[in-house]
Image (cartoon, coloured by chain):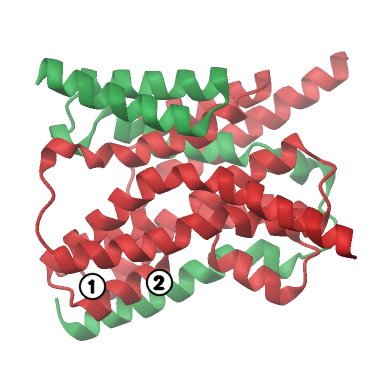
Amino acid sequence: MGADMSITGKTYWRGFRDGAPFILVIAPFGLLFGVVATEAGFNLLETMAMTVLVIAGAAQFAAVQLLQDNAPVLVIVLTGLAINLRMAMYSASLTPHLGKAPFWQRGFIAYFMVDQAYGVSIVKYEAEPDMTLAQKVAYYFGVISPIAPMWYGFTLLGALAGSAIPDEYALDFAIPITFLAMVAPALRSLPHVAAAIVSVVVALALSWMPYNLWLMIAAVLAMMTGARIEKWQESRA
Amino acid sequence: MSTLDIWLTIVFLGLGTYLLRLSFIGLIGSRKLPEWVMRHLRYVPVAVMPGLIAPLIAWPQATGGQIDPARLSAAAVSLFIGAYFKSVIGSIVGGMATLYLTLYLIG
């Protein structure tokens, strides 16, 4: 038991180290959300409540924008949920790895299922299939530990500072860079590369569609591409 | 934008997002998924993330949707470092450094 605990502890800190680089992008992104929400007319409590309860940057920005445009609440909520629909795919993808954890742990895993936690963890689980359930759970919470507090903290800072961040910082690009950094190491085989290319091409071709429909279609076609090529490779081997 | 609208949005978007995240991991739990489902799930990261950012890279809002050489080259550097060196931090730092450098040189 003692040895198990120390291995689990080490795995937690490995996760922490692997999550830490994302502070570089989470911090400015959180800051930006705090500023944007405050400028839109949110008070401090409202800004923080949204950041803590929704904990999904892209959907939060969209919701603030739509509230500012006086869109109906139903439309705002559905738009935000459409943007977050990818989280259901993350949930499915994590289930084979974390599904055996106690329900209360899965409750917390679900709450913290942000892009970075998912992206970093799933790459690790696939690279090291021998990890135990306890190690996988410890790693996941390790990744989240530097990320979630930074998201809350820098949103708070942005809300308190309240002044606009100059456009020259080009913070709009922190998000694309983050996703590239997460997904690039996962491009390790032909089916993975083919899936990514299909995802990009279909997303660009269909990006005129409303409600993030383009993303769902691109994702499903890309998954089918990866699965099909994998099967074809197996049948030839 | 009323205070009520803000709070209704926060509560329902928060609850709905949580249920999306809990969906599979909460309901399916330890039951085994069929092989064909697993085969598709392996490609979720490379199927979702590239598509999500492709329009942001091709037509950035900051330039009013115009193709931007600075952002394109930053994305290329980030992708190369991440794929070749498997380094997350190298990819982030390299990408942002390229962006600032090219914005400084061009802009």
Going by the image, does A31 lie left or right of A204? left
Mark 1 vs mark 2: tell me if same chain. yes
Among the two numbered marks 1 and 2 on one chain, the one whose residue lies closer to the N terminus: 2
Of the residues shown, which amino acid type is indicated by label 2? Val
Decide which of A199, B6 is in the foreground and name it. B6
Badge 1 element: loop
- B23 to A166, vertically: above or below: below
Vertical position of residue B66 compared to residue A4: above or below: above
Q: Is residue A109 left or right of residue B15?
A: right
Residue A118 in percent (x, y) is at 58, 50
Q: Give me the chain letter of mark 1.
A: A
Quick one: quadrant of the N terminus of chain A? bottom right
- A39 horizontally vs A185: left or right: left
Q: Residue at x 39, y 19 (%)?
A: B77
Q: x, y (%) of residue A214?
A: 41, 41
Which element carries disc 2, helix, strand or loop?
A: helix
Rendering coords of residue B13 (x, y %): 39, 71
Residue at the spot of label 1: A72
Q: Give the label on residue A52, or none.
A: 2
User: Looking at this view, is A30 or B24 the one in front?
Assistant: A30
Looking at the rendered structure, the kind of residue marked 1 is Pro
Please state the chain letter of the residue tagged with numbered disc 2 in the rendered image: A
Q: Relative to B49, is A144 above or below? A: below
Q: Are marks 1 and 2 in contact (CB under 8 Å)?
A: no
Q: Residues within 10 Å of mark 2 (few under 14, many from 20)?
A: some
Q: For residue A71, what is the image quadrant?
A: bottom left
Which quadrant does the C terminus of chain A fall into?
top right
User: Residue at left 18%, top 77%?
Assistant: A43
Q: What color does chain B have in the rendering?
A: green
Whether residue A53 is visible here, answered yes or no, is yes
C-alpha separation, residue under disc 1 versus residue under disc 2: 23 Å
Specify the chain shown as red.
A
